[in-house]
Amino acid sequence: MRDAETVTRSPVRTARETWFDHGVIALALVLLLSGFGTIVEGRDWWVTTILVATMTGLTCAVLRGLGTRFVAPVAILVELLVIVWIFVPETLLAIVPTPQTVTALADMASVAQQTIVQEKAPVAASRPIVLVVASAFGLIVVVADLMLQRRRAAPLIGVLLLAVFATPALVSGETPPAWLFLAVAALWLVLLRSRTATATRGGTSRLGAVPALALGVTALAGAVAFPSVAPDVGAAAASWGKPPPQVFGRGINPMIELGQNLRRNSTATALTYTTTFDEPQYLKVATLRDFTGRTWKPTETVRADLFEGERLIDSDIEVEPGRTRIRIDQLRSTMLPVPYPSTGTVTGLDGEWTFRRAGQTLTSRTDDSRGKTYTVSSLDVRPTAEQMRQLRTSIGPGLESYVELPPTMPSIIERTAREVTADADNDYDRALALQKFFRDGDFRYSETAPVAGDYDGNGVEVIAEFLRKKAGYCVHFSSAMAVMARTLDMPSRIAVGYAPGTSNIRDGESVFTNTSDDLHAWTEIYFQGAGWVRFDPTTSVGDATSFVEPAVDTPDAEPAPTPEPTQAAPQRGADTPEQPVAAPSEQGSTAPRSAIVTLAALLVVGAVPWVVRSVRRRWRTSRGRTDVEPLWRELEDVARDLRIPASAADTPRGFAARLTAQPGVDDDALQALLRRVEHARFSRGEQPPGDGVADLQAVTASLRAGASTRRRLLATLLPQSLAGRTPVARVAASGRLAT
């Protein structure tokens, strides 16, 4: 029959073995973190995550070394504080979190969730993404520490490591490298061997290690060979690893999906078209009017909306009619691309389709765009620049919603709008100034810089950051111009659809092709008498809007030379190299702050036990001048800190006998302190004359002098007496004291 102690109790592990287990797991997690490079770009996030996990792990180690309870809650609290100090330090009151801290973290988590749902791996290492990864690995460290306290820790740790190993593969669909699996699996086998050896300590033959080693090597070899004959891992996590959703799907906000589709890895042909107009056409699919301050929302027709099209245009403004024939290829939507403004006439289109009054977009409740070929009649509105300058817009009920703004906005938006248009005295010149500010200024087109710089989106805070960073794509340009126009009381909205596209000659006719790279957003501004006029502020994309200026007669002036034809502005896409990503300083780098915060936190965590222990010692010493009991408790704690074996059943004399056996102890001072405590306890509380402070100090100094350097260091940095008054030693099954 087996001993009952062996069955019911977990084996006692030494401090060295415990630290070894934690070290093995830490190394395995560091290796596994490298596998997340398939879902997050760069290395800044890796440094930050390592530092946060290290801080959390050392907190667990310190608390375990002290023998305290509630290790996990304290470690999570420390991780939370480190996260706050790294990611949202501006919300702190000195070093204390505030309610704004919770709000800021929640906002970052919301942005990270939106990025995870919308973006295709690997995503840029924006601060919200780094926040999620670092927080997750910190929690993994806490879970691993809890698992190590279990009797069957090795299998649980194996499941945890396997889950972390498989996560990047499930997200990105890329099979992890064999070396990573081998390294982590070998570390787990080392941990398994360590725990098994402890569980069977004293009863295991050295010969048993040979079959175990052979079995481990065979298992590793089989695991490495298995992926070569097994199916590839496929992406399974939400939208990561999958093609981005359609921009114009039913119920989808185009402004949210537009950026993700522009960053997709593959290019798909959406449609082709021919037109009777001399210029290629912008094809509008959706109109966005309602601005919440966080995003633009698709326009819903209301009773006050104006009827658009030719009826909004003054009779003295030149209008040219034309037709555009569109064939849908790989676009699936309940909305159809159409030129603007339309006359309302569509031929060749089957199904139930209607024009919305606001924006003149073509939609259906029951049909979709797949395989459709149709011809739309539309107008080319050609006012002169002088006519545009004479137009004055009155904001009535039909236009009030087009000038609405959130109650609070960053001041840079309106200030910049007024600075840019300071020399203009009419709405047309103001619109031209805004368009020129973006197209001909210091702004550059980039689909990745806003993600890396953590200002992707189209809200007011994003617009303010875009005006500072001056890098973004059509969502940022069109949103910024529309909001800036509204600050100048100019009715504005955003159109989403396709830029003009690429022209090819087929059978002597120009055929334009629009791909997913031509997805675009631009600004529309209302002029009473000319209707909604397109302005495209996005640099290097599409065409800038301007109308014919009046000719100026200059006497005896030579005729102006005919300008040489110039190539159209380059379009973004597979053939156009992406602009350089923002410099590291613009990407919201967290690594330097992580290093500083982690170093400071390490100093604090390391100093707190020593500070608390020192304060307790001073308090007891001051009380010990009138009462010997605090002095005796201090002596017990000194022995506990120095890892001197003791029993919970010890009397003062028995405890003193254990101390006497220690090398170099001051026996005279110890006996004097013992007589004083026995006198106080067995003489009805009467205190002997004088105090025992000097005796305590002499005994303490001799105990420390006789201890090893390692024990003195542990007593200073990890004083186990802070965990309680229970002596450090436990009585083992054999009856001897276990150290």
Image (cartoon, grey):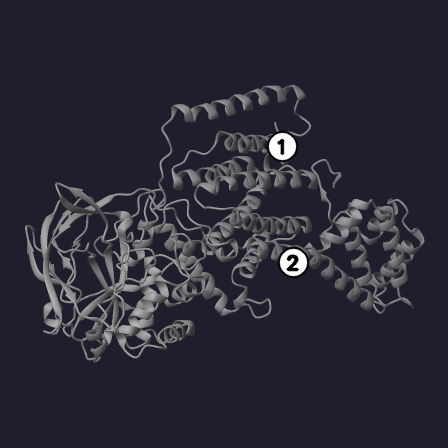
Q: Which residue is identified by label 2?
A: 600
Is 681 or 374 nearer to us in this picture? 374
Q: Residues within 10 Å of mark 1 (few under 14, many from 20)?
A: some
In the rendered image, the vertical position of residue 1 relative to residue 389, given as above or below: above
Is 657 or 247 nearer to us in this picture? 247
Q: In which quarter of the image is the C terminus?
A: top right
- Amino acid type at image mark 1: Ser
Left of 672 or right of it: where is 326? left
Q: Which of marks 1 and 2 is nearer the N terminus?
A: 1
In the rendered image, the vertical position of residue 174 relative to residue 60, given as above or below: above
- Amino acid type at image mark 2: Ala
- In the picture, residue 594 is in which quadrant? bottom right
Q: In which quarter of the image is the N terminus?
A: top right
Picture disc at residue 194:
1
| Secondary structure of residue under mark 1 | helix
Is 719 or 661 nearer to us in this picture? 719
Name the residue located 57 percent from the left edge and 20 percent from the top edge.
214
Is 41 or 236 nearer to us in this picture? 41
Residue 302 percent coordinates (x, y) = 16, 71
Name the residue located 47 percent from the left edge and 42 percent from the top edge.
36
Name the residue located 87 percent from the left edge and 49 percent from the top edge.
705
